[in-house]
Image: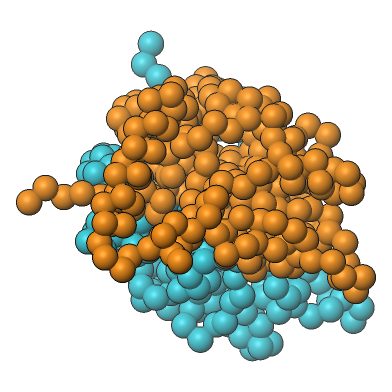
Chain colours: A orange, B cyan
Amino acid sequence: MRKVYADYAATTPLCLAARMAMMQAFDTYGNPSSLHQTGVEARNLVEEARAKVAKAINAEPDEIYFTSGATEANNWALYFGMCWVSEIEHDSLTSKCFPGLISDGSGVIKDIVRSSIIPTPHTISVGMVNNEVGTVQDVKYWGEFAHSRNELLHTDATQAVGHIPVDVKELGADLLSMSAHKFGGPKGVGVLFVRRGVDILPLLHGGHQEAGKRPGTENVIGIVGMGAAIEWAVSKLDESVPYLTRLREKLTDGILDIPGVCLLYTSPSPRDCS
Amino acid sequence: MRKVYADYAATTPLCLAARMAMMQAFDTYGNPSSLHQTGVEARNLVEEARAKVAKAINAEPDEIYFTSGATEANNWALYFGMCWVSEIEHDSLTSKCFPGLISDGSGVIKDIVRSSIIPTPHTISVGMVNNEVGTVQDVKYWGEFAHSRNELLHTDATQAVGHIPVDVKELGADLLSMSAHKFGGPKGVGVLFVRRGVDILPLLHGGHQEAGKRPGTENVIGIVGMGAAIEWAVSKLDESVPYLTRLREKLTDGILDIPGVCLLYTSPSPRDCS
């Protein structure tokens, strides 16, 4: 029996580009912080990967901070100051923020909680693609909304990067989280994008790595895999988006043919759930 | 010209055992938190590695928490409550703790600061092997000292594990940090050992991984590499300790033959520095 793996929102297989790049990086064993040649070789690999991540989301390399994954990136982004999220976000966000955003029954974030007794937030966080039902939020709208109130916009783009176009300048995002293993890279490595001009305190302390913002010897092999995977995933978006849309439609149409079945959590509106 | 890499205290080359195990793990792409077969396969790899790490330091598997490295492990171990360290520890410790321990000129921790105006610590942290000069501390003594005062003992064993025998029960350690890339494993993965009965709050939030103490999808490939590397490094301690000791003596003897050179930072005492 042929095995079909359909849990790509949980994690993806390692893509060939990442696998090849990681195997090559096995031999580049220096510590990127070492000043000698062996260290410089490892530093170059990290910086090449940073440039690839930056290019993939239309950011600058110095706006890219490598982390141990999106959970750390989310924790870091929203660690300082009051933040608001909706109740449909990932636990790494809802556990740290006030549920100040309201989503409707189909998973679309629609409004904010209006109350004079809730402190105004420092950052509004809107997930770009919901990790359970796939709803795509209007991040650009929420960015303009946040900026009109002198707040920052964070978006958890973990389920978006490599699957739909993500352009931090177009979105107006100040902070953006992602994780390599959602688009063909290895698990245990992610990125927090921090827009130039946004000052963020380190979450961890004790080293000068990542421009002094995220200490600890870099996960060189994982970072190399992330760079290769994001370059590969973004380069094939033109093919993969229509292909996956066709697959999704085929699956949902087939399931909806079963009598009594309806599709509840979907955008723009529930289908056949009268 | 043959290249000699002598910066193993900064990082080590990836050992063959880790490399082979990591290449195999490339194909086990499931998310360890997924309940289906593909997820269970990845979960099994993580738990096998956890058992190897536990065995290597005479701990129990449920005392092993994977992190993104020793810097995160140190930050986590000493995040809650007042901690004391000496000034010769790694930045990830000195940046978080009070310098309540005093070391002598050869890098040996000798005493505590005695003052009634300094709050007593919750945890005393003594690095097992100093990362700059290699001094080996009497961790067992400091463990007994800490416990006699109802304090916990944390030891940063990053430069010790895989290089000298480390037995958490013998040491009486309550918390112990290590990093895979110091003993032939990959960079970006480490462990915090937390003795059974010691309750530690999570540093990061938002997931049930690592018994609810350290969220985020596990760095499966890195963890597999760490497990393979620690098993390999500890299995060859009987050979590597005398071999490296001979190499060190040969190097220092050769350097000391140069007129006017003396060896200052060494234990038990400076050599030829009259």
Q: Which residue is at 35% across, 68% downward?
A: B54
Viewer can see residue B170: no
Q: Which residue is at 41% across, 51% downward?
A: A9
Residue furthest to the left in view is A1
- Residue A187, how many percent across, how many down? 42, 47
Viewer can see residue A102: yes
Side of A261 where B274 appears, left or right: right
Report the number of numbered marks.
Answer: 0
Can you say whether B1 is above or below A167 in the image? above
- Residue B113, how many percent across, how many down? 81, 71
Considering depth in this image, is A19 or A40 the residue closer to the camera? A19
Residue furthest to the top in view is B1
The answer to which image quadrant residue B238 occupies is bottom left
Considering depth in this image, is A167 or B214 the residue closer to the camera? A167
**Quadrant that contains the N terminus of chain B:** top left
Side of A231 where A172 appears, left or right: right
**Quadrant that contains the C terminus of chain B:** top right
Can you say whether B13 is above or below A258 in the image? above
Side of A260 where B196 appears, left or right: right
- Residue A126, how many percent across, how many down? 67, 52
Considering depth in this image, is A164 or A24 the residue closer to the camera? A164
The answer to which image quadrant residue B217 occupies is bottom left
- Residue A15, how many percent across, how many down? 33, 34
Q: Which residue is at 39% across, 75% downward?
A: B62
Considering depth in this image, is A128 or B223 the residue closer to the camera? A128
Q: Which residue is at 57% across, 64% downward?
A: A105
The answer to which image quadrant residue A116 occupies is bottom right
Side of A264 where A125 appears, left or right: right
